[in-house]
Amino acid sequence: MMRSKRPARKSDIIANMHSELDLSLSAPSPLHGESGLPGDKSLSHRAALFAALAEGESVIDGFLVSGVTRVMLNALTNLGAEWSLDKHRLTVRGKGLAGFASPSDPINCGNSATTIRMLAGAIAATGKAATLDGSDGLRKRPMDRVLIPLANMGARIESVNGCAPLKLTARTAALPLRPIDYDLPVASAQVKSCLILAALAAAGTSEIREPGPSRDHTERMLKAMGADIRENAPRSLRVSPLIRPLSPLRCTLPGDISSAAFPMVAAAIVPGSSILLREVGVNPTRTGLLEVLAAMGAELKIINKRFVAGEPAADILLNAKPLKAVSVGGETVVRMIDEFPAMAIAACFADGVTEVRDAEELRYKETDRISVLCKELRALGVSVEERQDGFRITGGTISGGTCHARGDHRLAMSLALAGLASPAPVVVRDAAILNESFPAFLPTLRSLGVRTNQTGTVFAEQKT
Ligand code: S3P
């Protein structure tokens, strides 16, 4: 077993600067207008990494520049990749799997589980040595879900009780990874992507099955780059080893539906609102929140459907209507796994008791999103009941007050939305963590008519 004391890094200093913002939102009138959204976070992570694994120059427009994607870019620098960023255009000069270096210092994955889990698979595929580490929060998140199958494939990785830091040992070409035949215990796109990447360098064809419909961006993007990945049955993938290098990418990424969730919920809870969000990714593995908001009574129209970067995209029109409680569980959960904090705010303003079940996976996100969400909502007066696999929220019980982002970007943004319709103001302490995924959160809401009151700095707003 490996132990290590994490040295202070530049990103820690940035994180401390982030923690200074106290945020409060209000809606002097209903939300109106149109807005675009920053590029999708999941697609940005994948595009950067896969472009580095390809051979040749990739040009990716609409790249999300945020805390967690910067962490991925810095990690790629450590691994010897060359890239440049011009506003939201990322250019990567990929050198193929063999072009990766073995960095001597640990790679800092910050708060990004997508970065550490996908890199674990990619580095295992390259056969290089590297240590993957991250923030104290990331060090608490479960990595055994990737460590166990990667070890079955022959990768040698040490961890600290199944958590980061992860130390991968170099392998010689004479010892290729073994193909895997594996049933994922949880529906997780991060785990699936990690194993697909490792399978690209295995000595035969791998079979990977998942229990639910997790996002399929990795399969779509790698196939477009020339990888042989087939769905041989629903939720069952057959991945062949690469016989030629991945081709570079040329694409424009669609807007992030997980960021669109915030203006959508904002408009849904402020009576009389009507907004249009342009070019949002509507991959069916990500659209659970649209179905849930529609079931709650919001008027939603998905228009101008098209394909952007091989992904379904559309414009979303939302008109506020009185909201009613719903029950969410089953397969919908994984298709809106990041949207529960925002959806919980809609539930606070719905008529009746909203119930979420089958969502225990939320306990393993940036925070334990069941217990932390319930605690912070209670601080705002909301009547909420915590369950092992979800929660129950009684609509109409919110009063307002002060709550805390608890180091979770989605919690920061969601709790702030509550102030748009609560009887008394809502102040979210330490809200600048929102820069991890959506640095344009405040300008986007302001463009739709939201008033923002902030004490402290939003670090990334001036930068991107
Ligand atoms: C992601 C997958 C999801 C999601 C995360 C991004 C991805 O995590 O919560 O924000 O880009 O693959 P899990 O795979 O752990 O469910």
Image (cartoon, rainbow, N blue to C red):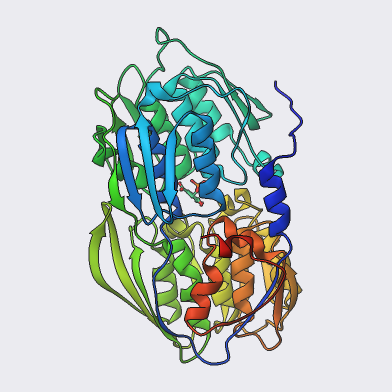
Q: Is residue 134 left or right of residue 36?
A: right
Q: x, y percentage for residue 279?
A: 32, 67
Q: x, y percentage for residue 213?
A: 38, 50
| Residue 285 higher or lower than 350, as above or below | above
Q: Which residue lies at the image location 53% right of the left edge and 83% below the top edge?
A: 269
Q: Where, by quadrant of the figure, is residue 348 drawn?
A: bottom right
Q: Where, by quadrant of the figure, is residue 416 drawn?
A: bottom right
Count of number-bearing discs: 0
Q: Which residue lies at the image location 45% right of the left edge and 53% below the top edge?
A: 41
| Residue 224 higher or lower than 32, as above or below | above
Q: Which residue lies at the image location 64% right of the left edge and 39% below the top edge?
A: 134
Q: x, y percentage for residue 456?
A: 72, 69
Q: x, y percentage for residue 104?
A: 61, 22
Q: Is residue 109 left or right of residue 206?
A: right
Say which quadrant the N terminus sits in. Answer: top right
| Residue 37 higher or lower than 118, as above or below | below
- Name the residue at the top extreme: 174
